[in-house]
Image (spheres, rainbow, N blue to C red):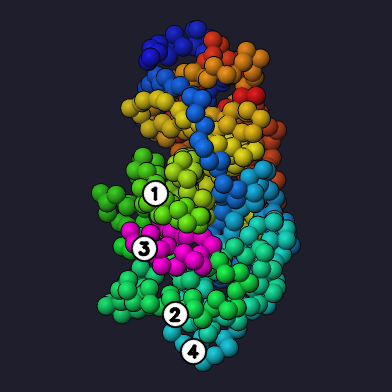
Amino acid sequence: MQIKFSYRMMILAGFTAIAGQMGRSAAIYARASGPEQASTRVVNVAATLTNRPDRRAIPRSFLGFSIEYGSIPQFFSRPATLRAITRLTGHLTKDNGPPLFRIGGNSEDSTVWRHLTPESRRRGNRIAINPDTARYLHDLVKATGSQLILGLNLGRGSALMAAPWIKAAQRIIGAPHIMAFEIGNEPDLYNRHGVRPRSYTLRDYFRQVQAFSRQVLPVLSRPKMLAGPAFTGPWRRFTPQYIAQFGTHLAVVTMHEYPLGAPVRNPRSPKFGSIANLLKPSSVAAFASLIRTTVQAGHKRHIPVRFAEINSAYMGGKRGVSNTFAQSLWSLDLLFTLAAIHCDGVNFHTGPVYGAFWPHRGGVHVLPLYYGMWVFAHAARHRAHLVRVRYRTPMNLKIWATQSTGGRLHIVLINKSLHRSAAVVLALPPTIGTAATAGILRLSAASAGAMERITFGGRTFAGTLDGRPSGAPQAIPVHILHGQIRVLMPPANAALINIH
């Protein structure tokens, strides 16, 4: 049933203490965002939480990062920087498993082990890794408890060149800390980037992977220790075929996707980098449609499937979009969307514009993307299962819910609308007793375009470089009245409601 009431009636009726607080937040938002948002419209939304938790818990180590080979010294060689990164990963870890680090990207097909052969010195192999590289990664996994996916150079390399790196990584980092070795980065674009001739086909790629795999398998510590195909374009629909052919030795299936492109200049293009395009529903829904069939194919063979490299805009992110609060809201919705189709994890690619964090002045500067991961990590605690939520709304609002071990309920509301508020009435399952208590943690900023002063539950990383948030936690009590919770969601805002 749709519950109708005006904004004035809502406040007069005592729309809980939080409604008043958020009314003030909405006013602050309007002043910060300019006159066009000063008169935001309120849309009433009725939602019902069911007693139907998903059969599958959100997987451990669902969250992850993707880092280029050339950035390893910058991230992990300095003790202070590594300590800050360890703290940041720790905020995401509680009962979720440590984040998974994938080392690769475009640098994957330009990286060689110590330039040992004449072949390794030609054809664009620019990055030489060595025992120090392995030791930095060992320090990372020792500090964080994370596992690694390590990229191998298929584009400009060979199995002969890869074998020394595989041996050194297993010896120095430790084989148990290595989930898999990924063979090549985005091979479906090799014939566009000059790495292969224009005539290069999927059949050619399959033959090369087969030969490459056959040669590296003898130096692997486990028979299932390969990853791929890391497709990002025209060959993605053939990933189930790849699984069928190489699944015997796959530890994880990897895919890539970016909804926008930093170099796109045409404002009418759906790939144009703008806050409006980033927050539109299709920029999240596309990820689910691209990987759903692959997830089903992988799980039939008990192989996890991850988006091992994603972010908002390819080619390093778009300033004024990828480094704004809009990225926080987008990433939060994306993580739940992929968890809902049983994807096994997400690795956000890292850069100074669109990463979750970036080394800065001997510490780490936290970027807006991290906040979306932080909220998701809270909702995914204690082996949480997604819970179905029934609602309909014409506005750009998403509602997600999880149930943790012990019966704790977490509800996440994400208002990605730039101009409309939502008056949300949440009907709780009848199993929620009268003694239940609820508190709300807000994810907020001055506007969708804000680059700093993002807060989650009153805490922020603005002004800190050591991985420790400043500010006291502010969980505002929420009243449960007749089995319902009422919350006002201002434009460009998210909230986590915890029910005990």
The residue wearing badge 1 is 292
Query: Going from the N terminus, do you reach mark 3 or mark 4 first?
Result: 4
Query: Going from the N terminus, do you reach mark 4 or mark 2 first?
Result: 4
Q: Amino acid at mark 1?
A: Arg
Please report the residue visible at 37 percent of the width from the left and 74 percent of the height from the top: 205
212 in the magenta segment: no
The residue wearing badge 4 is 119
Whole-Å distance between the Cαs marked 4 and 2? 18 Å
Return the mark for residue 241: 3
Query: Going from the N terminus, do you reach mark 4 or mark 1 first?
Result: 4
Please report the residue visible at 64 percent of the width from the left and 33 percent of the height from the top: 405
Residue 73 locus on image (x, y percent): 64, 69
Q: Relative to 487, is 221 on the left or the right?
A: right
Instruction: Indicate the quadrant containing the C terminus: top left, top right, bottom left or bottom right.
Output: top right
Looking at the image, can residue 476 be seen? no
Other-residue count near label 3 (Cα within 10 Å), few / some / many at <14 / 14–19 / ≥20: few
Residue 402 locus on image (x, y percent): 55, 33
In what element is the residue under mark 3? helix
Whole-Å distance between the Cαs marked 1 and 3? 14 Å
Looking at the image, can residue 211 be seen? yes
Q: Relative to 189, is 364 on the left or the right?
A: right
Q: Amino acid at mark 2?
A: Ala
490 shown above or below 69: above
